[in-house]
Image (spheres, rainbow, N blue to C red):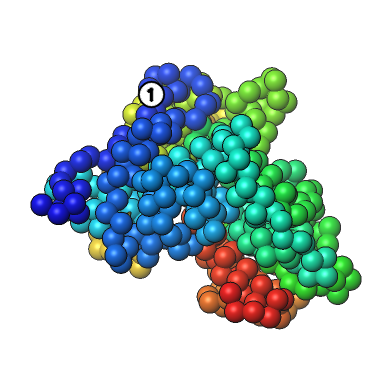
Amino acid sequence: MTEKAAKTIRRPRTEMPVQPPLVRIQNYLEVALGYSEEDALTEASRCLQCKKPSCRQGCPVEIDIKGFIGQLQKGDVPGAYKVLREYNSLPSVCGRVCPQENQCEGMCVMGKNPEKTGGPVAIGRLERFVADTFAKRLAGGDAACQQITGEAACRMTRDDLTVACVGAGPSSLTVAGYLASLGIKVTVFEALHEVGGVLIYGIPEFRLPKDIVRREVDAMRELGVEFRTNWVGGKSFTVKELMEEQGFKAVFLGVGAGLPQFMHIPGENDIGVFSANEYLTRANLGRAYDFPNHDTPTFKAEEVCVVGGGNVAMDAARTALRLGAKKVSIVYRRTKAEMPARAEELEHAIEEGVKLELLSAPIALNADEGRRLVGMTAQQMKLGEPDASGRRRPEPIEGATREIPCQLVIIAVGTRPNPILLEATQGLALTKRGYIEANPETGETSIHNVFAGGDIVTGAATVISAMGAGRRAAKEIAKRLLGTEL
Ligand code: FAD
Ligand code: SF4
């Protein structure tokens, strides 16, 4: 039997150790604990090192997956990290939050016949292992890790080549990391008081510890990226001022799409109704989970309903459990199969006791005389023909409604672009839905040398797609500024 054939004989994916559900809902610490070195080497050994690795085609930033796993197979963590960092400025983040099942792992050849092979290589978990282990070793003074970091930082920053990024989410961070590594001076302007976008204010600590995001941001500071917080594009400055008065040669707009959408049903203004955006921002950025040690309070209730079926809904539901709710239900108008959340988040939410109220659409939120929420009226739905997204359209079953008692409703049914910057930027072409129109290859907008990418162009999507857009724009900016094909 060839070595390759031997490798494809069923060896199950190495499980990720996690905190037990009943323990983790009592704390706000990370749920998934990460691979040990032994786990990582066992999992890496499942990779076939394919001649034409299909996994890479599934990665929006085109990480050389085969390359980094190959280094890991040799036990060379610094070498594996070096390969990763060439493509990805936020490997610890992506290893934790990317929907790998739809991307690299979804394309891995080992996933084609899982009965025989044990399933796709756990690429995300390996990425996390490499990035975390590298950071630990670097902090411990490991010479090989220091050399790699030193090589990245040794390029001189050219102060005559300056680029501004507006917004400090994953799209802008990717632009900043890529350009800084080429010696271009980048300044990032962020409206909030912390850098990281949704990674800081949206995704909870128990899924993505904030120290991990800060660590990645600090690595960019060391490359010379300057971060200016509490600067609101469109209010504190305009794009025109950045270019004409402050002399930035190019501007990247990565302001996300953080304006919450509501359902426009009766009762949405009553006490106890929150957008997921506000609820999660209080919990994460304001650290309401640690009140009163931090001074942002949150709204607590015994029975909570979260409306929606994506990652945002899962995060809100699991946060509510950790903040003391006795019963948390996800109310979703389709079935479990159509839920857009990452498979692992849905699985973890169910393990933790989150209930699913499927084929249910809220039609009214009901309050007492003091306008405090007491429950929700939900319309029973059935699935009809597929809609434009390819998912089967939910249709109401006439006369079938029911009451769900709850004192807190968190609405996670999507977001829209915030108009502040867009309205203040003359000549910026927008789509019919109010997002920025950008060239899909280069990210350039209708204004010369002004680029855009991430959720503000695509609508709410994923961290890695925002990073992919950032990378494309950064390549184009570098080409124009440095005059070289990269
Ligand atoms: P953002 O991350 O939204 O960052 C935009 C930044 O711009 C923000 O910091 C904002 O404050 C700032 N800003 C806005 N307007 C201005 C202005 N006028 N001036 C200056 N700054 C401004 N994706 C995944 O892949 N996996 C997940 O598990 C996942 N979970 C999620 C959970 C939640 C709760 C949410 C909300 C989203 C989740 N996503 C997930 C989606 C993902 O986080 C986004 O697609 C991604 O962050 C988009 O990146 P971005 O750079 O476009 O914008
Ligand atoms: Fe092949 Fe999967 Fe390894 Fe990629 S991760 S090289 S597709 S086995």
Q: Is residue 240 above or below residue 8?
A: below
Percent across and percent down for residue 38 are 36, 32
Q: Considering depth in this image, is 183 or 411 the residue closer to the camera?
A: 183
Give the residue furthest to the front.
143
Report the residue at 31% width, 34% height from top: 15
Question: Is residue 89 in sight in this rendering?
Answer: yes
Dot 1, how many residues are within 10 Å of its Cα: few (below 14), some (14-19), or many (20+)? some
Q: Is residue 230 above or below residue 142?
A: below
Q: Considering depth in this image, is 71 or 93 the residue closer to the camera?
A: 71
Q: Is mark 1 within 8 Å of ligand 1?
A: no
Percent across and percent down for residue 187 are 77, 59
Query: Where is the C terminus found, in terms of image quarters?
Result: bottom right
Task: Give the residue number, with chain letter if any, for mark 1.
Answer: 21
Q: Is residue 362 above or below residue 106?
A: above
Left or right, residue 254 beside residue 72: right
The residue under label 1 is which amino acid type? Pro
Give the residue furthest to the left.
1
Q: Considering depth in this image, is 257 or 72 the residue closer to the camera?
A: 72
Report the residue at 37% width, 65% height from top: 57
Q: Is residue 117 above or below residue 177?
A: above
Percent across and percent down for residue 170 are 59, 54
Quadrant hosting residue 453: bottom right
Left or right, residue 14 beside residue 405: left
- Ligand 2's quadrant is bottom left
Question: Is residue 396 in sight in this rendering?
Answer: no
The image shows a total of numbered marks equal to 1
Report the residue at 72% width, 64% height from top: 183
Left or right, residue 243 beside residue 125: right
